[in-house]
Amino acid sequence: MWVITVYGKNDIQMFEFDNQEEAKESFKKIKGSKVLSEVIYYNDFDSQLIEEAYVSSKVS
């Protein structure tokens, strides 16, 4: 799951997306201070996949 958090003067809004492409497309269109995050549920993966995701992750 991907989440965009938008910070306004008096509020915070969060938008959830099922895939990265849709989230990145929306991220480009949103104005203001924003953060794009990937949410990973560790209970859904085995430890080897988690380790591989951690090693290959990067901040952009």
Image (cartoon, rainbow, N blue to C red):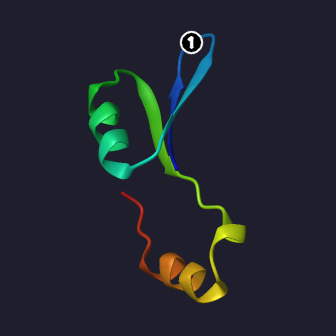
Instruction: Judge from the rendering whether residue 24 lies leftward or rightward of residue 12; answer left or right.
Output: left
Q: Residue furthest top?
A: 10
Give percent across and percent down for residue 18: 46, 46
Q: Residue furthest bottom?
A: 48
**Amino acid type for the residue under numbered disc 1:** Lys
Q: Return the residue nearer the eye: 49 or 31.
A: 49
- Look at 66% across and 69% down and name the residue there: 44
Q: For the point 49% across and 76% down, which residue is it?
A: 53
Vertical position of residue 10 compared to residue 26: above or below = above
Taking 56 as reference, is 37 above or below it?
Answer: above
Task: Identify the residue at horizontal 36%, vertical 57% (top origin).
Answer: 60
Number of callouts:
1
Q: Nearer the viewer, residue 60 or 30?
A: 30
19 on left or right of 48 = left
Q: Is residue 51 above or below residue 16?
A: below
Identity of the residue drawn at 32% across and 32% down: 26
Label 1 SS: loop
From the top left corner, tell me how far across and down residue 36 is, in percent.
Answer: 45, 43
Characterize the local packing of mark 1: few (<14), some (14-19) or many (20 or more) Cα atoms within 10 angstroms.
few
Name the residue that disc number 1 marks.
9
Residue 34 location (% of width, % of height): 45, 32
